[in-house]
Each structure stands twice: as structure tokens, then as C-alpha cells.
């Protein structure tokens, strides 16, 4: 099995037609059929179900194609990074983050990276906790920054900063910083929460704030976008909980109350796959020792 065979399988999985795939590969259709048949015999599994009219991926084929995409992506990245190192270039680092991370620690972290590794290219993507786990495990990311993640056992992590939570309210809401006594005052309110599937541990922490106050939150809207949550609160469609850092620089006409006396905190956390440390050892040591300024 070689990379050309993998690329041929990927193309066929997209075209689902031997003739069209062979034409794009500039080979004859019988040659492509023989290649696929030989590969299937080598791995001991049928990848494509064929009849006179249709070509479909089997369950084994779907798995094989997904893994082949990862291998080819890793191969291309390996070649690029090797060339960067050979040419004395810094290369690139792929970073994912949640909203509150960008509002607080990430700009300082990026400045630190640029100072100690000049010329490195940072590829940034806002991404929820769950997608960060998957991307890190598949080596599609180098570093993830998330709020209260439930870190998989095969990843490493470090808490870089701890925030208080705030409750976000419409400007017309009768509760304010002066008359707020405890969180139970919101027991009859409708809440806006993130989706559980995208960050179960984070949502569990938000729910526990309500449970500690003696009630179960009634969630009427779900969104993983902090700015969308701000808009919904502004429109009077519910109230929301956010790390206080999420408010930095926002201009929405809403009010907030900092929850200083609750046990739950927003833990802004760096995650990484230890396999990536060998690529940028000095950079990872720098980040692991990084402290909030």
C-alpha cells in the first residue's frame, strides 16, 4: 500500500465512478479497477460495493477513506514542516480557541510566541471544546485553548487563568448589582446555555451553579456563540452565564453581575497532543511555563 493508492481510493470515493476517476488520474479504467482490487486483497476488506450501475463505499471503505485522509494530510504537513526546518524557517502552528480565551489570554500568548519564535505563522480558528478534542487527537491542531474542558486522557493540559462567572441580564431586568443577594433569585428565569454535545463538562458546571442555588435551569435557547448569547439576552429572550472575560470589549446594551461568591470558576485551559511537542520543543516548554501577566 502506498500514498498513490490512497489518493486513488479517495478520488474514487468522491467520484463513485471508475471511468470518471480513471480519466482524472490519466489511467485506463481497467488499471484503476486492478489497483483497487489488489489493495482490497492486501488489506483483506472490500472497500467498494460495485454493480453494473453503481459504486458505493462499504462500511469498511468509509473507515478506510477517513483514515486515508488523515494520513495524506499528515504526510503533506510533514513535508512542509521538514522543508521549513531545512530552510531555517519557523513554520506554522495551528491554534484553536473559545471566545473567552481570545478576550483574555490568547493575544498575550501570541505576542509571546512571536517574540520567542519570530516568523512563525499562527493559524487561528474559533472552535468549541468537543471539536478541539477531536482535532487535537487527529493532529489537525497543535494547541487548543478551551474553557473548563473535559480533557481526554491522551492529551495534556494546563490551566492558565481562572475567571469568575457573570450572569448576563437585559438592561430592563429588575435585579442589579445593588439588590442582588444570591443566585436563587433567578430560579424562575429562562436560560440561554451552550449545547451539551459541544462542551458537556462546561454545561455541567453552568447547571451546577443553578443546582447549588436550589433549582434546575429552564433552558429555552442553546448557542455556542457568546455574541449570539449577548444578542438573545439583549432581546429579552433569556439570561445567560459567561466567564467575565467574555465581556471584554463588548458593546451590547446588557448588564452583568459578577458571581464572586460561588464555588464554580471558569478555568481557561491549554490543551495539546504530546506527540506535537517534538516538533516545537522550545515553544511548548515556553507555553507550559507561561503565566498571566
Image: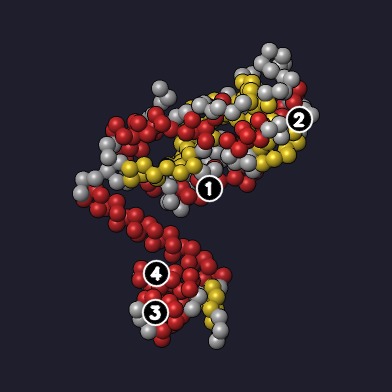
- Classify 10 Å Cα crowding around label 3: few (below 14), some (14-19), many (20 and above): few
Contact between labelled residues 2 and 1, with CB atoms less than 8 Å apart: no
Tell me the CA gap for discs 1 and 2.
30 Å
Tell me the CA gap for discs 2 and 4.
54 Å
Residue furthest to the right in view is: 188
Locate residue 272, reporting x and y percent: 44, 42
- Classify 10 Å Cα crowding around label 4: few (below 14), some (14-19), many (20 and above): some
Q: Nearer the viewer, residue 28 or 93?
A: 28
Instruction: Report whether residue 153 is seen.
Output: no
Q: Image quarter for residue 111?
A: top left
Contact between labelled residues 4 and 2, with CB atoms less than 8 Å apart: no
Q: Residue at x 67, y 23 (%)?
A: 171
Answer with mark 1 or mark 2, whichever residue precedes in sequence. Answer: 1
Answer with mark 3 or mark 4, whichever residue precedes in sequence. Answer: 4
Q: Left of 204 or right of it: where is 122? A: left
List the residue tagged with mark 1: 131
Give me the disc on residue 7. Answer: 4
Give SS at disc 1: helix
Query: In front of the other: label 3 or label 4?
Result: 3
Q: Left of 78 or right of it: where is 226? A: right
Tell me the CA gap for discs 2 and 3.
62 Å
Give SS at disc 2: loop
List the residue tagged with mark 3: 23
Q: Nearer the viewer, residue 287 or 239?
A: 239
Answer with mark 4 or mark 1, whichever residue precedes in sequence. Answer: 4
Give me the disc on residue 53. Answer: none
Query: In front of the other: label 2 or label 4?
Result: 2
Residue furthest to the top in view is: 178
Give me the disc on residue 189. Answer: 2
Q: Residue at x 29, y 46 (%)?
A: 91
Answer with mark 2 or mark 4, whichever residue precedes in sequence. Answer: 4
Q: Residue at x 36, y 42 (%)?
A: 122
Amino acid at each position: 500500500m502506498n500514498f498513490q493508492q490512497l489518493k486513488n481510493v479517495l478520488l474514487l470515493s468522491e467520484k463513485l465512478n471508475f471511468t470518471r476517476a480513471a480519466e482524472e488520474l490519466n489511467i485506463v479504467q481497467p488499471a484503476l479497477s486492478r489497483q483497487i482490487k489488489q489493495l482490497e486483497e492486501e488489506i483483506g476488506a472490500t472497500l467498494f460495493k460495485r454493480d453494473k450501475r453503481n459504486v458505493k463505499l462499504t462500511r469498511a471503505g468509509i473507515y478506510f477513506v477517513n483514515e486515508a485522509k488523515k494520513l495524506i494530510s499528515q504526510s503533506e504537513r510533514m513535508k512542509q514542516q521538514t522543508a521549513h526546518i531545512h530552510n531555517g524557517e519557523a513554520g506554522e502552528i495551528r491554534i484553536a480557541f473559545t471566545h473567552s480565551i481570545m478576550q483574555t489570554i490568547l493575544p498575550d500568548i501570541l505576542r509571546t510566541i512571536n517574540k520567542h519564535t519570530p516568523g512563525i505563522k499562527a493559524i487561528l480558528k474559533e472552535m468549541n471544546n468537543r471539536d478541539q478534542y477531536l482535532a487535537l487527537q487527529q493532529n489537525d491542531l497543535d494547541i487548543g485553548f478551551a474553557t473548563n474542558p473535559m480533557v481526554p486522557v491522551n492529551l495534556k493540559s494546563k490551566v492558565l487563568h481562572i475567571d469568575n462567572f457573570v450572569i448576563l441580564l437585559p438592561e430592563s431586568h429588575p435585579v442589579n448589582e445593588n439588590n442582588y443577594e444570591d443566585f436563587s433569585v433567578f430560579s424562575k428565569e429562562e436560560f440561554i446555555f451552550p449545547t451539551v454535545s459541544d462542551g458537556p463538562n462546561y454545561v455541567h458546571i453552568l447547571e451546577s451553579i443553578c443546582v447549588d442555588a436550589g433549582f434546575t435551569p429552564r433552558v429555552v435557547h442553546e448557542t455556542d456563540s457568546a455574541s449570539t448569547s449577548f444578542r438573545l439576552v439583549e432581546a429579552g429572550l433569556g439570561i445567560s452565564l459567561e466567564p467575565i472575560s467574555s465581556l471584554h470589549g463588548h458593546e451590547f446594551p446588557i448588564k452583568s453581575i459578577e458571581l464572586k461568591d460561588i464555588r464554580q470558576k471558569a478555568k481557561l485551559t491549554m490543551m495539546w497532543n504530546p506527540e506535537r511537542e517534538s516538533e516545537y520543543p522550545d515553544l511548548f516548554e515556553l507555553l507550559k511555563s507561561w503565566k498571566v501577566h
